[in-house]
Amino acid sequence: MISIGDLDRLLGRIIQKVDQSRKEFYHMGENLRQEYEKAKKELTEIKSEITYVIHRVDTLETEYTQARKHLMEVSKEFESFGEEEIKQAYEDAHKKQIELLTLREREKSLRLRRDTLELNLKTLQSTLLHSEKMLSNVSMALKFLNNDLETVSSQIGVAHQMQALGSYIIMAQEEERKRVAREIHDGPAQSFANVVMRAEFCIKLLEREPSKVRDELYRLIDLVQKNLQDVRKIIFDLRPMVLDDLGLVPAIKRYTEEYLKEYGIYTDVAVAGSERRLDSSLEVALFRVIQESLTNVKKHSNAKYVMVKIEFLPNSVNVIVKDDGCGFDKEKVMLQKQGSGFGLIGMRERIQLLKGKFEIKTAPNKGTEIFISLPAATETQLLHNIV
């Protein structure tokens, strides 16, 4: 049994972590606000410069027209003018023409930059509003932890409270992943910076070498499609919607299909027992652990084949992730505070918070096998009542 003192210390650490998250959200909001104000200021300056350039272009067009008119008069009556005066008339017209072309190009560039900044401002404003909502939610959670957890713990018991808190933390993390996924989906303007550069290049080609615009536009389409695929992949990594809609097994199969395409590591997914939907916290925990395991395989094992087995039992669910890679010294890696050691510790703690079992079997040149077992019936209704 865990003593009240141990529980208090645990709650104190949780409150400290939540408060740290609140501060991080606050600083993130301030940074976003500064970026917003900076972009807003730059947009104002660019609009002012556009106004000046437009006025200057109008003036130069008049001057250029007059210079050409004078040049034509000199050319027609060249016998009445000296060689130096004819030369000066030509140079004046040419100079006005070059300056006018330069200013027109500058005007186009400024207009494009203005449009990009306006889009970025909308994205920053939306993200800033989301960050303020997240800060508000975390502040409310911190207030709840500070004011009510002691009363709740006395009512539900030490063991139940720890499990509920662990599930609450995991679910809170997943909710944040959902929000980040939506934000990336709604406004990935920064990831398309290269697209803007390509578009600028197309505009210049249209004026100078129109025949090459078609090929460049095809390249631009390919670039946009690749960026879209990257964004969709990020969204899937953050929170695969198939996990919510269809469950653990379809989500794992979808993930391993993409895993094979991207890394060339064949992954076989085997299901034993009667497949069924699990509690959301269980499905999320198992998906994340399998995902982290496959990430470690890709980064460290040099494996060619991975087997993922999911076994549904009446009162539990077991998962085995086994690869044919190089293996590692388990004791040495688990002592590390960064890299794969940190990942393995996080996986173990995630499973232990749900009263599950986490084991690793490995050795150098022997491959790696990760075994996970979670009770299928968890008392998550308690968590729902708390939330």
Image (cartoon, grey):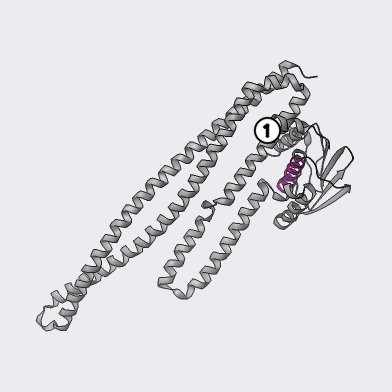
Residue 267 % position (x, y): 79, 53
The quadrant where residue 83 appears: bottom left
> Is 341 contained in the magenta span?
no
Secondary structure, magenta segment, majority class:
helix
Q: Amino acid at mark 1?
A: Lys
Q: Nearer the viewer, residue 144 or 170?
A: 144
Residue at the image position 89 percent from the left and 47 percent from the top = 274
SS type, badge 1: loop
Question: Where does the magenta region start and end?
Answer: 283-305
Q: Is residue 210 above or below residue 226?
A: below
Residue beneath label 1, please? 337
Residue at the image position 51 percent from the left and 57 percent from the top = 194
Q: Is residue 92 left or right of residue 238?
A: left
The quadrant where residue 328 appears: top right
Residue 16 % position (x, y): 61, 25
Q: Nearer the viewer, residue 268 or 255?
A: 255
Q: Nearer the viewer, residue 80 or 44?
A: 44
